[in-house]
Amino acid sequence: MIQLSGFQSDALREIGGIGMGNATTALSQLLSSRVQLNLSNSQIMDIASMASMMPSSMTLVAIMMDLTGDLTGTMMMLLDPGSAVTLCSNLLREHALEENPEMYESALSETVNILAGSYLNNICEFLGTRVLHSTPEIVLEDAETVFSRIKDRSDATSSEVLNIETMFQVQGLCNAQGNCTLYGDMFVFLDEESVGALLILIEKLLDGRWEIRK
């Protein structure tokens, strides 16, 4: 498996921040609320170990999309159920959950579809590459099942993948308990072949900038 240098890890974290920066702008416009990035991280991880970092009893809302094109893998937005309901309630202010639950699922799927498109468009423009995402699939499961599904969607023979994670928060969306801050995570999982391709793209970009400066 590829071992990332400190410089490569920093560059990949920056890539995640670039992508999510565009996505947070789109989310802020959808919700008319302030959205900010909390953390961007990148590392080679075993998918199974990621599940163990979360409470086993915790149910998660995972919205998953396959990535195709110059880079392949899986993209996932992760929310706790309360945050997912709060997000949808603010998108569909005039509707009640009891009246049409399917509408909430549709709203969540379309929102993540917009965010994923914004995320990938920004990265593709920055790197000069082409990556597409599939229609979002919503999964409501415990952490172990969620990350098992990520592994099942991967073509990689190894369970180790590059994980680019970007945490964000939305301020001003109050739920029934009076909590007015919503937290979420956006993940991009790439297998070894795509990691190598991404690192080459980064090197080419840096070489081109160096030539311009000279």
Image: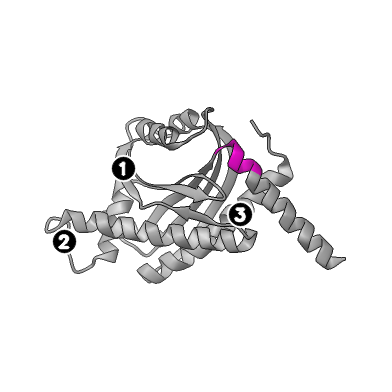
Observer-nearest of 136 and 35: 136
- Residue 192 among magenta residues: yes
Q: Is residue 98 in sight in this rendering?
A: yes
Quadrant placement of the C terminus = bottom right
Q: Earlier in the sequence, mark 2 or mark 3?
A: 3
- Cα gap from disc 2 to disc 3, whole angstroms: 38 Å
> What SS does tag 3 mark?
helix
| Residue under numbered circle 3 | 15
Of 195 and 142, the residue lying toward us: 195
Rendered residue at 66%/34% (across/down): 2
Q: Please identify, in this view, whether the residue under mark 2 or under mark 3 is nearer the observer.
A: 3
Q: Residues within 10 Å of mark 3 (few under 14, many from 20)?
A: many
Instruction: Reply yes or no: does residue 139 show up in magenta.
Output: no
The amino acid pointed to by label 2 is Ala
Q: Position of residue 91 (x, y in %)?
A: 29, 65
| Residue position marked by numbered label 1 in the rendering | 139
Q: State the SS at label 1.
A: strand
- The amino acid type, in three-letter code, at marker 3 is Ile
Residue 16: x and y, percent?
A: 57, 53
Q: Main secondary structure of the magenta part?
A: helix
Mark closest to the chain's N terminus, 1 or 2:
2
Q: Residue at x 44, y 53 (%)?
A: 133
- Residue position marked by numbered label 2 in the rendering: 96
Question: Does residue 82 appear left or right of residue 143 in this picture?
Answer: left
Q: Is residue 51 left or right of residue 175?
A: right
Residue at coordinates 40% horizontally, 51% vertically from top-left?
Answer: 134
In three-dimensional space, the C-alpha distance between marks 3 and 1, rounded to whole angstroms, equals: 26 Å
